[in-house]
């Protein structure tokens, strides 16, 4: 038996989903020694690596990909909606407190610039993570004998 870990990850390396698959590799070895067991395990992992992806794994990939694409699209729409907000600019009333109002306006402008930069960063990160990549790695081999 070979245990394969299938993982779908983003371009940034974040794992969106993973699952294990057990594959039976035919053979009837006797009780192997440590050296022979390592060789059997390596051969079994090599055989499994060249197998086509099983139908249930293909269905899982399609389901995870569709869910991930929907999630990313919704998050991108949210970020773009928040970033496109329009604040009402208030005029500074002339008078005794002009300097305080000007300082508040400058601080507010700096905060708005910082928020806009953060939204652009989030949109960029989400866009990079939109596509998923499959990796399939043998993680364990079980050798049984009679």
Image (tube, helix red, strand yellow):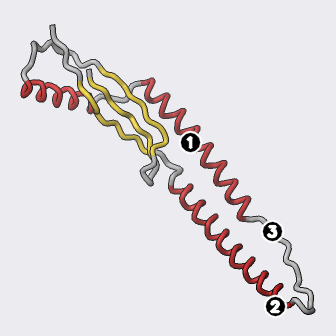
Lateral position of residue 139 relative to residue 125, left or right:
left
Mark 2 or 3: in front is: 2
Q: Position of residue 47 (x, y in %)?
A: 22, 28
Residue 137: name its quadrant: top left
Q: Earlier in the sequence, mark 2 or mark 3?
A: 3
Mark 2 residue element: helix
Q: Residue at x 21, y 32 (%)?
A: 46
- What is the secondary structure assignment of the residue under circle 3? loop
Left or right of 72 in this view: 103:
right
Q: Earlier in the sequence, mark 1 or mark 2?
A: 1
Q: Nearer the viewer, mark 1 or mark 2?
A: 2
Query: Residue 15 lies in what quarter of the image?
Result: top left
State the residue position of label 3. Answer: 86
How far apart marks 1 and 2 lie (CA) works out to 50 Å
From the viewer's perspective, is 31 left or right of 108? left
Q: Is residue 94 above or below residue 45?
A: below
Q: Position of residue 62 (x, y in %)?
A: 51, 34
User: 100 or 75, which is in the foreground?
Assistant: 100
Per the rendering, the mark at residue 68 is: 1
Q: Residues within 10 Å of mark 3 (few under 14, many from 20)?
A: few
| Quadrant of image for the N terminus | top left
Number of disc labels: 3
Residue 48 in percent (x, y) is at 26, 28
> On the image, numbered disc 2 is attached to which residue?
99
Q: Quadrant of the C terminus?
A: top left
Residue under the image location 17 percent in, 27 percent down: 41
Q: Which quadrant would residue 51 be assigned to in this image?
A: top left
Q: CA distance from mark 1 to mark 3?
A: 30 Å
Tell me residue 139's x, y (percent): 28, 33
Q: Which residue is at the front of the view, 115 or 67? A: 115
**Circle 1 — which element?**
helix
Instruction: Give the alpha-carbon distance from disc 2 to disc 3, as whole Å.
Output: 25 Å
């Amino acid at each position: 038996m070979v245990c394969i870990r299938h993982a779908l990850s983003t371009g940034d390396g974040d794992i969106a989903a993973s699952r294990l698959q057990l594959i039976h590799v035919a053979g009837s070895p006797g009780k192997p020694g440590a050296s022979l067991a390592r060789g059997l395990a390596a051969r079994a992992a090599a055989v499994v690596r060249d197998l086509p992806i099983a139908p249930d794994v293909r269905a899982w990939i399609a389901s995870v990909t569709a869910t991930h694409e929907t999630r990313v699209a919704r998050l991108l729409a949210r970020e773009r909606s928040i970033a496109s907000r329009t604040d009402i600019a208030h005029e500074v009333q002339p008078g005794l407190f002009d300097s305080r109002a000007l300082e508040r306006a400058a601080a507010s402008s700096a905060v708005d610039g910082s928020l806009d930069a953060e939204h652009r960063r989030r949109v960029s990160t989400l866009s990079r993570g939109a596509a998923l990549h499959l990796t399939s790695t043998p993680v364990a081999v079980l050798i049984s004998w009679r």
